Image (cartoon, grey):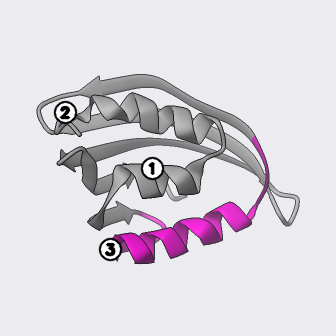
Amino acid sequence: MTDHPVRIHELLDYVRNGRIMDAMQEFYADNVVMEEPAYGRTVGLAANLEREQKFVDSVAAFKTFEAPAVAVGDGVSSYENVMDWTDTDGNDIHVEQVAVQRWEGGKIVHERFYYATS
């Protein structure tokens, strides 16, 4: 595997194709730290898999996943993301966010999401 974060494009293809849990296994390091406004910090792949599975289980139907802007640097990548889905309670959800990833050994070791919570 390469240390270069160009793998972000592969990761985004996994998500577009509904393979979120597969993406977690393929692209995230065992010691990954993920941060986002709604959940705070989640440390370790196992804890992040559990959190992500709860999210996946709360989705009745994905409608849109777009990443119109992707940037790649030395050991870092980021993307702008727009998602729409219907949750299991029938609510339509719309999220616009930016994610920044730090890569080591071809895997994401840190990911932080930025979005408004109000």
Provide residue 57's location: percent of width, then percent of height: 72, 67
Q: How many marks?
A: 3
Q: Nearer the viewer, residue 92 or 21?
A: 21
Q: Earlier in the sequence, mark 3 or mark 1?
A: 3
Q: Residues within 10 Å of mark 2 (few under 14, many from 20)?
A: some
**Residue 100: image location, x then y, percent:** 30, 44
Label 1 vs label 2: CA separation? Answer: 26 Å
Name which quarter of the figure residue 88 lies in.
bottom right
Q: Name the residue carrying label 1.
A: 115
In the displayed image of the protein, which residue is found farthest to the top?
68
| Percent coordinates x, y for residue 59 in the rendering | 75, 58
Q: Residue at x 46, y 56 (%)?
A: 24
> Does the CB distance between marks 3 and 2 fall below 8 Å?
no
Q: Which residue is mark 3?
A: 44
Residue type at tag 3: Gly
Which span of residues is magenta-colored?
A: 37-62
CA–CA distance in space, label 3 to label 2: 21 Å
Residue 20 horizontal/vertical position (percent): 57, 51
Check disc 1 and give the amino acid type.
Tyr
Could you tell whether 17 is left or right of 37 in the image?
A: right
| Vertical side of 5 occupied by 109: above or below | below
Residue 93 colored in magenta in the image: no
Residue at the spot x=44%, y=70% of the render? 48
71 vs 75, nearest the viewer: 75
Residue that carries the numbered disc 2 in the rendered image: 4
